[in-house]
Image (spheres, rainbow, N blue to C red):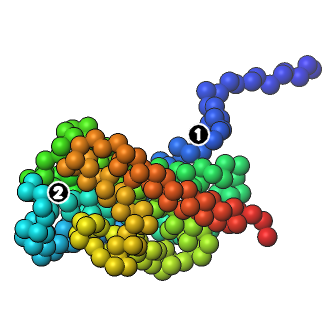
């Protein structure tokens, strides 16, 4: 009796294409899908800048405008960049990364052939989506209060992009802390790093109104130049020298924070 050869059945199922961009999209997609469930992180990011904006405008508007030599000076427009910086700074998926570390999900992920840089870059993509979205309500608030962009619709887009890039540049710090410590408390406390950036600068008064050591510190604070760039887009026009300095400071902060974050990632994935 002759044995019958088994019949081979072709399947339409194909293995998912493996590669860096596939890994990146997978990590970013998971992080973006988690955003609507993380309201406790998003809501304070809008409440805090609105609170500071209302307090600063209510307390300093009349005094600052009366003592400014420029008759067209608007303190509301002057404060709008501060509000957006407060909205986007410190916003990251670092808390999600800590949960992945504590639950063992990151360890299981590291057992796969996923590209290691994609683990962090995918989260940063989700961060950019979030800070871009957070910028829009702040713009609407400024528009409702009468802020008129001297650079028009393109200036509004540039304003949002510069703010989002700053939020992304600062995000490297909480990621470095998350990967180094695996502690949610340490990640939540990382916002304290922003306080010297925020308050030792021209956040509340023009540079010419600052005196003594505060004026000297503001000269070396990268946020001073970022605020100058954002204010130029709002009130001054396309002042490319000022805008260029602001972007250079964002790039410098991003280079430092990303170096720390990827170094911490390397330490985390390196076998003991």
Mark 2 nearby-residue class (10 Å; few <14, some 14–19, many ≥20):
many
| 133 lies above or below 152 | below
Q: Position of residue 173 (x, y in %)?
A: 51, 66
* 64 displayed left or right of 171: left
* Closer to the camera in the image, 184 or 81: 81
Residue located beneath label 2 in the image: 77
Assign a secondary structure to mark 2.
Answer: helix
Residue located beneath label 1 in the image: 21
Q: Position of residue 11 (x, y in %)?
A: 65, 27
Assign a secondary structure to mark 1.
Answer: helix
* 132 displayed left or right of 32: left
* 114 displayed left or right of 248: right
* Closer to the camera in the image, 214 or 112: 214
Q: How many marks?
A: 2
Residue at far right of view:
1
Quarter of the image with the N terminus is top right
Mark sitting earlier along the chain (2/1): 1
């Amino acid at each position: 009796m002759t044995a019958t050869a088994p019949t081979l059945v072709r399947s339409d199922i194909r293995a998912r294409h493996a590669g860096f961009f596939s890994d990146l999209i997978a990590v970013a997609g998971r992080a973006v899908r988690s955003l609507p469930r993380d309201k406790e992180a998003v809501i304070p990011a809008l409440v805090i800048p609105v609170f500071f904006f209302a307090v600063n405008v209510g307390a300093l508007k009349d005094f600052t405008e009366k003592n400014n030599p420029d008759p067209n000076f608007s303190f509301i427009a002057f404060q709008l960049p501060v509000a957006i910086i407060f909205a986007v700074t410190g916003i990251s998926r670092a808390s999600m990364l800590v949960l992945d570390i504590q639950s063992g999900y990151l360890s299981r992920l590291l057992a796969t052939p996923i590209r290691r840089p994609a683990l962090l870059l995918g989260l940063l993509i989700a961060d950019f989506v979030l800070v871009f979205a957070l910028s829009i309500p702040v713009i609407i608030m400024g528009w409702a209060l009468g802020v008129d962009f001297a650079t028009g619709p393109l200036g509004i887009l540039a304003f949002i992009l510069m703010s989002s890039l700053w939020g992304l540049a600062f995000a490297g710090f909480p990621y470095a802390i998350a990967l180094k410590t695996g502690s949610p408390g340490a990640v939540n406390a990382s916002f304290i790093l922003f306080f010297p950036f925020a308050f030792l600068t021209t956040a509340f008064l023009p540079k010419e109104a600052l005196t003594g050591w505060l004026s000297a510190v503001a000269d070396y604070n990268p946020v001073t130049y970022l605020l100058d760039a954002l204010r130029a887009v709002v009130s001054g026009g396309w002042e490319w020298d000022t805008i260029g300095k602001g972007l250079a400071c964002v790039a410098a902060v991003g280079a430092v924070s990303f170096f720390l974050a990827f170094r911490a990632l390397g330490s985390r994935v390196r076998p003991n």
